Amino acid sequence: MCSVGDDDFENDLQKVMPVIKNVILSETCNKCRARPPLVVLRSKDFYCKDCFLTGTTHKFRALLGKSRLIRPNDIVLVHHQIGHPSTALLHFLRSALDLSTPKKLQFKPVILFIDNQYHLTVKERLDILTAVEQEVNSFEFNLYFISFAKYIANPDSIEELITTHDLTISENDKDELDSLVKTKCSLTNKNDIKTLFQRQLLLDVARHLKCKFVFTPDISIDIASQLLSNVSLGRGSHISVDTGFCDDRDEIVKILKPLRLFDMKELALYNKFNKREPLCVRQPEINPYSSIQDLMKTFVNNLQSNFPATVTTIIKTGDKLTVEQTGLQICTLCKNVLSKATPQLRAEDSTNFSHLISTQIPDQSYSREERYLSLLDTFEKEEYGNKDLCYACYKISNHMMGY
Amino acid sequence: MPSCSTKCGRTAILKRPKTGDVLCKDCFFEAFENEIHFTITKAKLFTPNSTVAIAASGGKDSTVLAYILKLLNEKYNYQLKLLLLSIDEGITGYRDDSLETVKKNQEDYDMSLKVLSYKDLYGWTMDEIVAAIGRKNNCTFCGVFRRQALDRGAHLLKVDYLATGHNADDIAETVLMNILRGDLARLSRCTSIITDSGDGIPRVKPLKYCYEKEIVMYAYFRKLVYFSTECVFAPNAYRGHARVLLKDLEKIDPSVIMNIIQSGESIKVNQTVNMPTLTNCTRCGYVSSQEICKACVLLEGLNKGLPKLGIGKSSKVKRLLEEHSLKEKSISKNNCSNSNKTCENTIIDKDFQCLCLGKKESVQIDQLPLDKLTI
């Protein structure tokens, strides 16, 4: 049956996905209504340089302040990457720490750079390490390095792995990653596994450095595409911790996403006005159809350019979701709360039954009804999944070594 | 082709997108049918001795649904009385042809068929609506009217259940779309296998866990007659984004569809979030989240010559209606050029020309005799 229009919301099209109209330039800044505008955000808001910078800083401070999580003298581990978001984050922090007003930030950031750019040559990677060191030093922060590959090979010896300079890297680091997964593992699952390990790495380093918080440089588009990827991987019940402002799965260390409401344009302009040039790195050529995560990123990017409310709508949808009550059993891989067993039929049960029925030898000596009953009997006796893993982690665990 | 995964010895003819297993024709038939039986019994979709209306469009999903429900009803003794319910939107070159298919199904499956038309229910065919509104927002009318028409049909027929042919792809697509639109109310209920539209007749989706590809293959191998032409009023682009995305995702990994449904089923909305409350339309009594339901607003727009009334923000409806009544006062009676006399109808276009085509009766749905609706 035609399902177009089934949900009678085509008529809300303008409301939920307003199409970009031609921008009509305003004469004055939206905020101060005095100076001529220099920046256009969201294709409709005009700001002069001063109002833009004030607004951007306020946005950063407001999100941090609203959460009321960080106390004075807490140590915060900042996950540094290459690009505008990370450079802007360092600038936000440095300028907020240098204030002499009561608004001065009271916590102490330390910076962590993870060497994981394995599409580059060893020389390029070494150059990056030097450049990162210079960049972070220019902001006068303490910097630690860690190799992602070495962490995967030896996750229990953080103390030996983190270093403040001269990280040892080698051509073989890439192989270390591959040894984690079986040969038939798809890129989608590899990305998923990498994300899980990176999260664990950040937590382990944070604990070692006695940090109570971790800042990641994820911006709005990262959050929106991760949310959609989560849904596509069957991690729907974990959306609020995976993409929310605060990931409080770990009892000691909380992972915060202070840039989750910023878009790239805002941060790039922020860096430009502050005369900060982020580092550049040769990006690998990505085929959007090679993995679900890449496809989602491309999809959100394309939709956003035509419908500017896309990313905010997705993020706001995620913000209104929650997880099941805590205190239940935890998944050993992603550390999320496991869904309670429910008598209701779920997609998981249907897939398991389909697989069973597609692999059982039909005994033609019985009638069809009898065959079905015996199959149902087998289905109900069998244990599916792993009681220590969630739906999505169980699926990827089949592709991981050691599981 | 490799041999069938069930080790029955025959050569496989297809690879199942749902599980990756390969099956021969016979094993596929049995697996596909038993899976739907599994869904129906596990989710307790029907109670014995009830009447089920199958929403039949003549397309692949509803044809397969009707065929399988009849087959399972006999094989596993559900004790159901099955009948077909079709909606005639009045689209020349599309629905008239597909209704022929439904009539063929009726004969093949020996079920009674009721056809309700938009013309009978609302006084307008889709062809007339498109003539009034143009090709841009016509799917809005069709979708809103069809949903209500099916429920009204189910009510008229006094059935206990209304079964629709929504498949796994449809459901996954709806989950994605509701996230993109930020519609939490629909997001939390779109994966339910049984939904109640408020009038006591549950809608059930027995094909919820069936891949569209497998439905097509089943219909093909069973040689079922179905109608596969796209609607002549090309679908608009809205669902398109989610549909294209889902097809791309399926190419990367077909199990994504089940993952999305699994996610949709386990999503939990924060209780502090304000959700729209469902009430009944003050005009027609149909369940709605607004004071006046969308169908009534759209119908009023059509009848008042303001076809765009229900398109866009609901908050604008009142203002538009007020403006319209002011205009109406300025021309106290509509001098109808078609019937050469003063027309009782208020169906006029923006230039205040009567659109009644000479004669137009307003239709009261509840007074329609049931036999008038039967073919």
Image (cartoon, coloured by chain):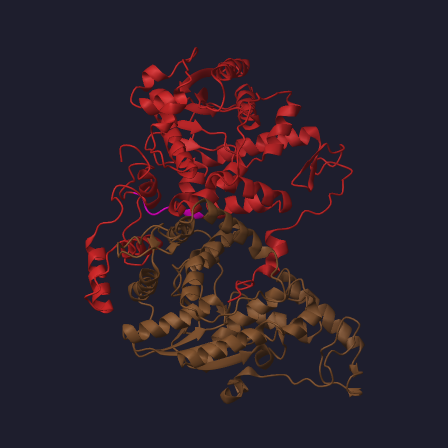
Chain colours: A red, B brown
For this rendering, which residue is in front, A356 or A157? A356
- The quarter holding residue A166 reads top left
Q: Position of residue A214 (x, y in %)?
A: 42, 28
The correct choice, above or below, for B136 with respect to B49 in the image is above
The correct choice, above or below, for B226 with respect to B13 in the image is below
Q: Position of residue B25 (x, y in %)?
A: 35, 61
Q: Position of residue A75 (x, y in %)?
A: 41, 22
Part of the protein shown in magenta: A321-326
The correct choice, above or below, for B237 with respect to A158 in the image is below
Q: Main secondary structure of the magenta part?
A: loop
Q: Position of residue B364 (x, y in %)?
A: 58, 84
The correct choice, above or below, for A84 with respect to A10 in the image is above
Q: Residue furthest top?
A: A166
Give the mark count. Answer: 0
Q: Is residue B137 magenta?
A: no
Which quarter of the rendered picture does the C terminus of chain A lie within? top left
- The quarter holding residue B52 reads bottom left
Q: Is residue A322 magenta?
A: yes
- The quarter holding residue A5 reads bottom right
What residue do we see at 76% from left, 37% from top?
A28
| Residue A90 appears anywhere in the view | yes
Left or right of residue A227: residue B352: right
| Residue B294 appears anywhere in the view | no
What residue do we see at 76% from left, 33% from top?
A36
